[in-house]
Image (cartoon, helix red, strand yellow):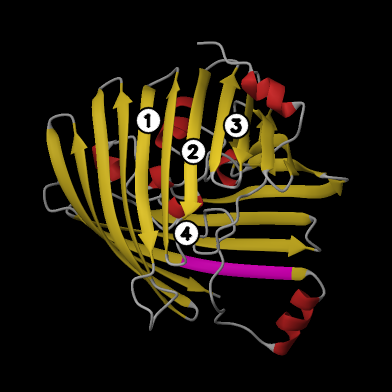
Amino acid sequence: MRVTAACTVLLIAAAPARADDLAASPARPDYEATDKLLMWSGRKSLEDRGVTVDGTYTFETFAAPHLDDELTAGGLFTLEVDLFERFHLSAFAIHGTSPTDELMDVHGVSGNTAPRDVRLFEAWVEQPIGVVTLRAGLVAADQQLVIADQSQTLLAATFGITGQFSANLLGPVYPVAAPGATARLETRRIDVRAGLYDGSQDNWHGLLRALGPGVLACGEIELDRWLAVGAWHHTERGDAVYAIADAQLTERVGAFARVGVGDGPITTYLDAGVRGAPLSIRPDDLVSVGIAFARAAAGAQTIVEGNYELQIRWVTIQPAAQVLFLPGQTVGVAVVRTTVTL
């Protein structure tokens, strides 16, 4: 399948992070806690002047009684620096494991766990030029494209950027960014986003070692801030088209659905879910339910997740239950994620 839409879109404009301050993980775009543990007058003064330095630590425990490693755990420390809403730098320290290390599933039980490392993530400069905003530097596609806001509170990796994108293209997604340029055009009814990235991600702890030879182009058009269609083309790993429906249905309930068809290990991908604030006395708490299906080369794989997000100032606690339907086995996983915003 040969797709030209991504290249066409790229000529028009390209890629913002789609903001969702309810996101469950600091590794996902625009994560923002309701409070910070280490806040003092000097730090507040710097923020008022456009200088923001944020740190978060997330710890997860996983219980999967049917696996050889019944109990596993992992952690993620994130440092982000933003200057005058123009310059951004982020870095990670990652440790631990998750059941995905044993299952080798395409969805990923957690969007935080990754190989043990201390590494640079994104480092970019952004500049508005008229109605278009450009961004260039080390950038990651999962911070800007193929995203549904209403899925961001689910813990499985596939509910960030889709497992189809990660498995078929291998990046640039958390925890690896790549040299690239993105841009966006936003109007009252139509948003256009796209990006052009180095498609090989040859780096050492996030520092570039070489460019190419692969190139990735990706773009999407969104109508009325809820319905988007997009495509990507990788010079070595093939093409895909996708669609996203993502909407706040009422004041307290939102829903999402995504579908993708393309070349690579995952030829067909579907996910859907709902998110709501069930308690009026705790309006910041959320309940999320999602399901994702992937038709992979080794057989179909499905994950179902439900979780509760409890926010208490600078601490967010998320107990979750997941069931993975994999070729030849069904596995249940219990997860507890605790995030502290420093």
Query: Which numbered disc flags the more N-terminal residue, 1 or 2?
Result: 2
Q: Residue at x 59, y 20 (%)?
A: 233
Residue 300, percent across and down? 24, 27
From the image, tell me which residue sits under label 1. 269
Residue 73 position, x and y percent, is: 31, 59
| Mark in the foreground, 3 or 1 | 1
Label 3 sits on a secondary structure element that is: loop
The residue lying at 51 percent from left, 62 percent from top is 77
Marks 2 and 3, how far apart at CA: 26 Å
How many numbered circles does the render carry? 4
- Residue type marked 1: Tyr
Task: Report the residue marked by disc 4.
Answer: 25
Above or below residue 73? Residue 17 is: above
Mark 4 or mark 3, which is nearer the start of the sequence? 4
Label 4, label 1: how many angstroms apart (C-alpha)? Answer: 23 Å
Q: Which of the numbered marks, if any, corresponds to residue 244?
A: 2
Residue 129 x, y percent position in the rendering: 88, 45
Question: Which quarter of the picture shows residue 47?
Answer: bottom right
Q: For mark 3, does the 10 Å Cα neighbourhood hold few (<14), some (14 to 19), or many (20 or more) residues?
A: many
Q: Amino acid at mark 4?
A: Ser
- Hey, what amino acid is under mark 2? Ile
Secondary structure beneath label 2: strand
Q: Which residues are magenta?
A: 52-57
Amino acid at the residue labelled 3: Gln
Question: In whole angstroms, how far apart are the C-alphas of marks 2 and 4?
Answer: 21 Å
Residue at image mark 3: 201
Labels 1, 2: front one:
2
State the separation of the CA atoms marked 3 and 4: 23 Å
Earlier residue among tags 2 and 3: 3
Q: Please report the residue visible at 42 percent of the width from the left and 19 percent of the height from the top.
A: 264
Can the viewer see residue 53 in this picture?
yes
Question: Which mark is first along the chain, 4 or 2?
Answer: 4
